[in-house]
């Protein structure tokens, strides 16, 4: 049996539901002969709440899971993300973007056939071509800006096609351009999900990243970030999603499916496993 280090990385922005239970049990099972870690992805400070964090621990313990302490809370590790950004910046791969959401939408609408990625239309690259003087001037004016990855330039920094092994989907060739020039940090967010997840998986020694199939596209980008940051390459396993009776994936707003509600209705951890087909 493989001695993988795996993790379950929930965001404390709502109650856990059956989909989370599946992801957590899946990760714990894959890490059974090795290590199983928990990471709280709480960088969205406007939505993360202590009661949701407490709820996560309660639900996971109820499911019969245990994990290594101390666990990582992303909000406590700003310096790690800063160092990652500095490294990308020193390679000349970041640029400040001053566009508002509205301006981006307008530009995309005017362009007509704008290319789309997994999260919608791609950023048209407006701020990529600003001169150093324009950048300095705007930054000095105090307006807020995001840091974007110049993905075209980033690809010139890596050799050959980037591959990854997905234990559910086979060998994959990464196409990191599908998200365009993604935002890696904002004024109030020290790191976007994409940057934080690769840095954290690496420093936690995660060797098998398990998560839902909805995040498979993100791995195309993660594989590039891993290469640029010189991090070890883990394996991935993107597992099936738990759907509701209408075939839609469960969302945090579906409180009826939250584990705490099911528990109050008398569900047992065994019933959860049965319903999930585990
Ligand atoms: N915090 C992310 C989520 O809840 C975790 C994604 C991942 O496992 O990489 O969807």
Image (cartoon, helix red, strand yellow):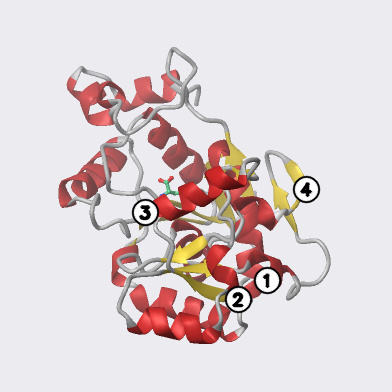
Q: Nearer the viewer, residue 162 or 209?
A: 162
What's the distance in space between the residues labelled 2 and 1, CA to CA?
6 Å
Task: Tell whether label 3 touches label 4 (CB within 8 Å).
Answer: no
- Please tell me whether mark 1 sits on a helix, a strand or a loop: helix
- Please tell me whether mark 2 sits on a helix, a strand or a loop: loop
* Label located before the other in sequence (4 or 3): 3
* Label located before the other in sequence (1 or 4): 1
Instruction: Kindly identify the residue that appears in the image at 29 percent across and 30 percent down.
Output: 253
Of circles 2 and 4, the one toward us is: 2
Residue bearing mark 3: 67
* Label located before the other in sequence (2 or 3): 3
Q: Quadrant of residue 256?
A: top left
Q: In the figure, 11 relative to 257: above or below? A: below
Q: Is residue 170 left or right of residue 190?
A: right
What's the distance in space between the residues labelled 2 and 3, CA to CA?
37 Å
Q: Nearer the viewer, residue 92 or 77?
A: 92
Of circles 3 and 1, the one toward us is: 1
Residue bearing mark 2: 93
- Please tell me whether mark 3 sits on a helix, a strand or a loop: loop
Task: Tell whether label 1 touches label 2 (CB within 8 Å).
Answer: yes
Which label sits on residue 154? 1
Residue bearing mark 4: 171
Q: Is residue 141 left or right of residue 234?
A: left
Instruction: Spot the residue most to the right.
Output: 160
Tell whether circle 4 marks a residue whose Cβ is less than 8 angstroms from ligand 1: no
């Amino acid at each position: 049996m493989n001695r993988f280090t795996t993790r379950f990385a929930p965001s404390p922005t709502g109650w856990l539901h059956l989909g989370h239970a599946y992801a957590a049990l899946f990760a714990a099972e894959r890490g059974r002969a090795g290590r199983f870690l928990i990471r709280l992805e709480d960088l969205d400070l406007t939505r993360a709440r202590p009661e949701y964090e407490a709820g996560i621990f309660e639900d996971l313990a109820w499911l019969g899971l245990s994990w290594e302490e101390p666990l990582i809370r992303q909000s406590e590790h700003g310096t790690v993300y800063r160092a990652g950004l500095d490294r990308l910046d020193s390679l000349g791969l970041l640029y400040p973007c001053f566009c508002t959401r509205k301006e981006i939408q307008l530009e995309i609408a005017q362009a007509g056939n704008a290319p789309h990625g997994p999260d919608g239309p791609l950023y048209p690259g407006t701020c990529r071509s600003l001169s150093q003087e324009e950048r300095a001037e705007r930054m000095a004016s105090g307006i807020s800006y995001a840091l974007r990855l110049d993905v075209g330039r980033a690809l010139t920094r890596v050799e050959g096609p980037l591959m990854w092994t997905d234990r559910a989907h086979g060998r994959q060739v990464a196409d990191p351009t599908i998200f365009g020039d993604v935002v890696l940090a904002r004024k109030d967010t020290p790191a976007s999900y994409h940057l934080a997840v690769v840095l954290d998986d690496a420093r936690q020694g995660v060797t098998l990243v398990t998560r839902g199939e909805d995040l498979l596209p993100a791995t195309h980008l993660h594989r590039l970030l891993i290469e640029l940051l010189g991090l070890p390459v883990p394996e991935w396993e993107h597992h099936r999603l738990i759907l509701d009776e209408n075939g839609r994936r469960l969302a945090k707003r579906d409180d009826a499916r939250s584990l705490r509600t099911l528990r109050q209705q008398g569900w047992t951890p065994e019933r959860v496993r049965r319903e999930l087909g585990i």
